[in-house]
Amino acid sequence: MNPRIAELLNFIYEERAQEALEKIGPVLEETRKKIGPPPDYAGGFPLDEGDAVLITYGDQFREEGRPPLEVLKDFLDSYLLGTVRGVHILPFSPYSSDDGFSVIDFEEVNPEWGSWKDVEAIAAGYSFMADLVLNHCSKESPWFKAFLRDEEPYRDYFITVAPGTDVSGVFRPRTHPLLTEFKTASGPKLVWTTFSDDQVDLNYANPDVLARMIRIFLMYAEKGARIIRLDAIAYLWKEPGTPCLHHPKTHAVVKLLRAITDELCPWLIIITETNVPHRENLSYFGDGEEARMVYQFALPPLLLHAFIRGDSRYLQEWAKDIQSPGEGCTFFNFCASHDGIGVLPAKGILPDEELEAVVAEVEKRGGRVSYKAAAGGNIAYELNINYFSAVAEQTLSDSQRARKFIASQAILLAMPGVPGIYVHSIIGSQNWQEGVQQSGINRRINREKLDYAVFREQMSAPASLREEIFCAYENLLAARMGETAFHPLAASRVLPTGKECFALLRESRDGRQPGRVLCLTNLLPKEADLCFAAKDLGLDGELCNPVNDYRYKRTGIYFTELVTGDTVYPTWENGHGFSLTLEPFEVLWLKY
């Protein structure tokens, strides 16, 4: 066995390390015989500037007589083929609650949605991102039902706590009690339930649990996954007397999964889902030996704040400090998802009064606020609102709302890393209030499932809001393809502007095709003037001498706007800099 894998198992299990080796070793050998690289994998980082990932439920689109996963592939092929290369299908196993995140059977596909054949058909045409909900499973799962019957080997698959145990120091992401009492064949037991009483935490102190989940992890890779998302990974390892958040053995489990993929399937990317303050989130890169991607959780609240307040200063300051996570690692940028907009990742970046202003405005725009337990009482944890509804207030015209929303998405697509695009963003959905009212679940506001025939009619209607947003989004995605400056590992630099704009310089020194793109966005419904020093853009000083319009056009000091293909001639000032004017909510991606 790989010495690194053995070393990590020794750290995790100490005196039980040999037992862990004996359980996990055969799983790895079995996979080694069955798995091989995808035909398009040539080594190195598996994604490039042409990669974006659609985030969607497996049953997002429904049509009578067809399994939803088949309908989803129809949507992908009809609307996104050639534009979006990746698709993240949120948990697709049988489940009992939480819209898929209370998994009953990790090894099966929800029969109401389709089969493994449908999943593999999508994986064959797209970079498939699978969800591994490895912190917990459903209380309806066969594993937990066997635990309730006190059967081996399942009686040690879950975490039980003696009555009276002090768990007050455990970090709580929710307001409900940490422990839930269940009646078992050997009497009542208090079981650890971090997220809900239907989501029972798995006991990773038992090597058999880790071996089972590694087998499932590798099965997803065998089924075609190119990216695997480790859901709620920060809570994985429990130890009394600690917060049970970011435990060193949790990090060791991520390192173990990375070591396994490096050996067996180096084309597979591990991404960690850790909705925590920014610096804690970055810890899951480790020293380059943990996740290859982490969610950029600070981006959604900071981007929303910038557009609600018309003030990019906090976004600029945060983005200036984003450092490259290291060779072969990058960020997964998103602003909307099946969950809400996390508040905690913006703590310490936005002042409390600015966060409070965003919370108040979200409520005015039809959103909800979810709370978590804290020492001083419940605090705002998540904003539940559709991102289009949050960014683009209804007092604007439809055209202005579309332009404002697309401006926000242009910043998402320009950021260093891989963009993740929630399906409701690219198709221009809005708050689904009926879902909240019907279920009492705040997150349903952004989880509407759509009748596929109705959706197609809406998309084909002339000048519909859905069609306008989709086409603008598609144009941005097409523009970044093939531009090495947008490679996930390419450099980025924030250029100073007034608070009404955001300017990001992306630069690649890739041997294939070095390039630079200046990404400019106006956050306001009025014109904005921008000035840049030529040296900040790396322009050759000889070409910046003061000359008349005819001369500087001839020497090549101009830009190509990537989305429209237009040529943009800025106004040069004394050869040391230039200025230009952005229209309301205008986006310019300038290549030079």
Image: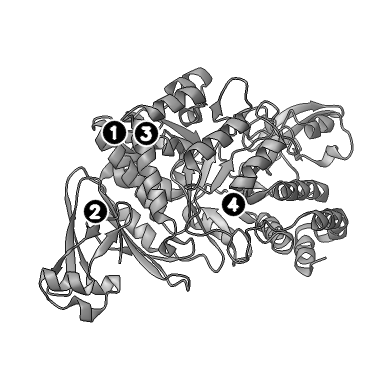
Q: Report the disc number at residue 272.
A: 4
Q: Earlier in the sequence, mark 2 or mark 3?
A: 3
Tell me the SS state at disc 1: loop
Q: Is residue 520 left or right of residue 29?
A: left
**Disc assigned to residue 181:** none
Q: State the residue position of label 3.
A: 467
Do callouts 2 and 3 mark residues in contact (Cβ within 8 Å)? no
Q: Residue at x 75, y 44 (%)?
A: 203
What type is the residue that disc 4 sits on?
Thr
In front here: 592 or 352? 592
Q: Which residue does the numbered mark 1 point to in the structure image? A: 393
Q: Amino acid at mark 2?
A: Lys
How far is the residue under mark 2 from the one under mark 4?
32 Å
How packed mark 3 is, by other alpha carbons closer than 10 Å (few <14, some 14-19, many 20 or more), is some
Element class at badge 4: strand
Q: Nearer the viewer, residue 218 or 455?
A: 455
2 vs 3, front mark: 3
**Whole-percent x, y for residue 287 in the image:** 59, 67
Image side of residue 304 versus residue 273, left or right: left
Q: Which mark is residue 499?
A: 2
What SS does tag 3 mark? helix
CA separation, marks 4 and 3?
Answer: 33 Å
Query: Between marks 1 and 4, how big is the CA–CA gap?
Result: 32 Å
Q: Is residue 553 visible?
A: yes
Nearest the eye: 555 or 289: 555
- Foreground mark, 1 or 3? 3
